[in-house]
Image (cartoon, grey):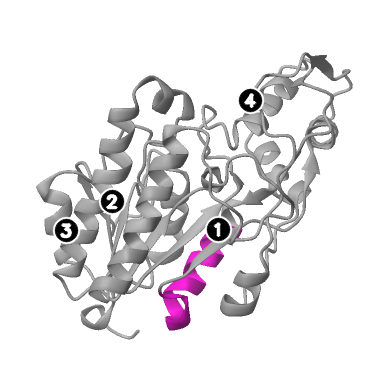
Amino acid sequence: MSTESNMQRILITGGLGQVGSYLVDALHEKAEVTVLDNFSSTTRETVPREISIIKGDVRDRIAADLVKQNDIIIHTAAQISVTASMEDPLSDAHNNVFGTLNLLEAARRSPTSKFVYISSAAVYGDPLYTPITESHPQDPLSPYGTSKLSGEKYCMMYHKAFGLPSCCIRPFNIYSPRQDPDNPYSGVISRFIDKARTKQSPVIFGDGNQTRDFISVHDIVDMIMLLLENEEANGQVFNAGTGNSTTVSELAHMILDIFGVDVPVQYMPERPGDIKYSCSDISKAREILGFEPKVLLREGLMEFEEIKT
């Protein structure tokens, strides 16, 4: 795009958070980017100068006004704490359901060319089989998972009923140096790294054979970039993972090795409610989007080692 006047205008909600901030990095030279963020879980202190940052909430009028001023909406903002959702389901729903609905309603009354919604693998609940396909039953175990699934359903309904070009991704365990250590889907990495940096034993609850599909935020950004360019993605939901599973024990030993720490792994009794096995099937994203994860887990974890203090 040669001039600023023909650049696409992109609104990124939650643009100071983990996924949003990396999207800003990837898009700010290609588009006019506006960030809407309530500063509740900011993971970075500086952003590119040309970015417009608006402090506000996705439930407010300002969010609807910003939607009308932009061509593409990438909705990453959310209440992401499972624990908080269990303690206050109403607040979780206000953020994740009504916030999403506020944006969608504004988008359908605007010339929106694409609405991208970041959902969660929490919509599946306990897997009945692995790898998990998009058609796997959705039976969330928390208000958080339920609210994310509700947002998905609204997006798909707005596509079918109102012709809004919308699509959704279901990330599995995203990780990056900017991740929120309180996020249950990436928190195990943060906890293990914190232990490694202080030469303490990482703590695993259970036998360590439970598996997770850890995906680098860089691969998540790549998938979203592919979504923006693909009309066939409209009206679709995609798993966002690597298609590979790693045991928690393997993860702990990998982190200790990266940080050069020689301490034993500590095992504690299994926590009730923890999902045993999780792995994504990304065949659909490969077929429709041409998506292929590029960052191996060890390479992604090396980013944490590079910024250690």
Query: Mark 4 or mark 2, which is nearer the start of the sequence?
Result: 2
Return the residue at label 4.
273
* Label pair 2/1, CB-CB below 8 angstroms: no
Disc 3 or disc 4, which is closer to the eye? 4
| Amino acid type of the residue that numbered disc 2 sits on in the rendered structure | Thr
* Label pair 1/3, CB-CB below 8 angstroms: no
Return the residue at label 1.
220
Q: Is residue 100 left or right of residue 304?
A: left
Q: Residues within 10 Å of mark 1 (few under 14, many from 20)?
A: many
Q: Nearer the viewer, residue 87 or 58?
A: 87
Which image quadrant for residue 198? top right
Mark 3 to mark 2 CA distance (whole Å): 14 Å
Q: Which mark is residue 100?
A: 2
Secondary structure beneath dot 3 equals: helix
| Residue at 37% across, 65% down | 156
Which secondary structure class fits the magenta region best?
Answer: helix
| Amino acid type of the residue that numbered disc 1 sits on in the rendered structure | Ile
Q: Which mark is residue 66?
A: 3
- Would you say residue 24 is visible in this rendering? no
Query: Mark 3 or mark 1, which is nearer the start of the sequence?
Result: 3
Q: Position of residue 302 (x, y in %)?
A: 72, 44
Magenta residue check for 233: yes
Mark 3 to mark 4 CA distance (whole Å): 40 Å
Mark 1 to mark 3 CA distance (whole Å): 24 Å
Disc 1 or disc 4, which is closer to the eye? 4
Q: In this rendering, is residue 55 above or below 257?
A: below
Secondary structure beneath dot 1 equals: helix
Q: Which residues are magenta?
A: 219-234
| Residue at 43% across, 36% down | 144
Q: Is residue 25 left or right of residue 212?
A: left
